[in-house]
Amino acid sequence: VTSHIMLTDRCNHTCAFCSVQARAGDSLPYYDVLAYLDILMSYGLKAVILSGGGNPILYKCKETGRNFNDVVEAIHARGLEIGLITNGMPLRKHMYERGVEGKMVVRESWGTVRPATLDKLTWVRISMSGLDHKENEVYVPDINPSKTTLGFSYVAHDIYTEPADPHHGKVSRVLDLISGDTKREPDLYFEERIDTLTNRIKMYVKAYSPRYVRLLPNCLEPELISRRVEQLEKMADIINFAVDRECVFVQYKPPAAPKACYLGYVHPVLNCDGYVYPCDSCVLNETAVHSFANPWRVCHWRDVAS
């Protein structure tokens, strides 16, 4: 019914909570993506979610040079609905031809994404991870609400700075510290930022009127999940009261694999390594490696029909 496609593991952010921070520089070949979709469409595929891995709007096929705009155009031409999960990137002004009037107008979009591409997306969920980085900003393009649903998401987490980390020097659990210092305290506690984050998220809700804001605890800190949920529910109540509508909610996500899971049959995930997985959960990660583990592979995309 739906397939999750992780186009690339290239990313412009270094999130401590990232479940796939071990990146090999993979990007799916453009024509492999289309061939995979054509196979699944024969089984009734209705929608695609473009995500990461990395940041999907940074996608560029190494063989053809085709980019994110080309992928969206090809998927849209097949009549499929398209969802996008991204942390965005700096905005720039694009000249845009408006509908039947043929008038050229200025419209802001992410640097690599044409405004016409935004209008082909059914929904966009922007990670607010920019609030954890030096830009302290969430880059929100000019999304037409009559065509595309806008949502935000924020993950509550502690941060350990680990310069020796081979990926990007930020981790969110002592298990990933190179030193193995299990008694070390985080360099930045989530509790220190609650008030600031509440005000910043409230500002974005007022400015952009998203359909929803999802707040959730970090799955890599399972021992903190119950406490985080309580903290996030208080944040949600404050923001909802301030904007006078119920748009902020908290998602409880305990990271545990079920005894049997059938979601992969109706919602397979194509990773940028070319293999299909049953989901994109962090429970597929090998301990302290942060990449999808081989034992969880269902098959290569070419074999998805068999």
Image (spheres, rainbow, N blue to C red):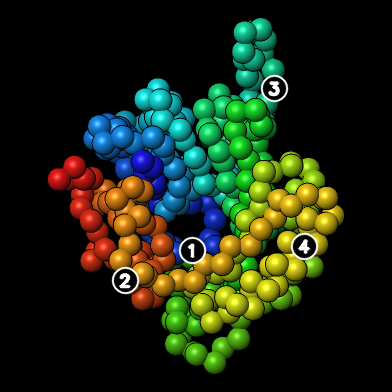
Amino acid, disc 3: Val
Give 100 or 66, whichever is nearer the viewer: 100
Give 188 or 157, whichever is nearer the viewer: 157
Give 93 or 267, whichever is nearer the viewer: 267
Residue 173 seen in the current view: yes
Point out residue 54 in the picture as x, y percentages from the top left corner.
Answer: 45, 52
The residue beneath circle 3 is 106
Q: Quadrant of the N terminus?
A: top left
- Left or right of 59? Residue 136 is right
Distance, label 1 to label 4, CA atoms, is 27 Å
Tell whether label 3 touches label 1 (CB within 8 Å): no
The residue beneath circle 2 is 259
Question: Which one is closest to the eye, mark 1 or mark 4?
Answer: 4
Residue 35 seen in the current view: no
The residue beneath circle 1 is 18
Query: Of label 1 and label 3, which has the lower sequence position?
Result: 1
Q: Is residue 210 above or below residue 213?
A: above
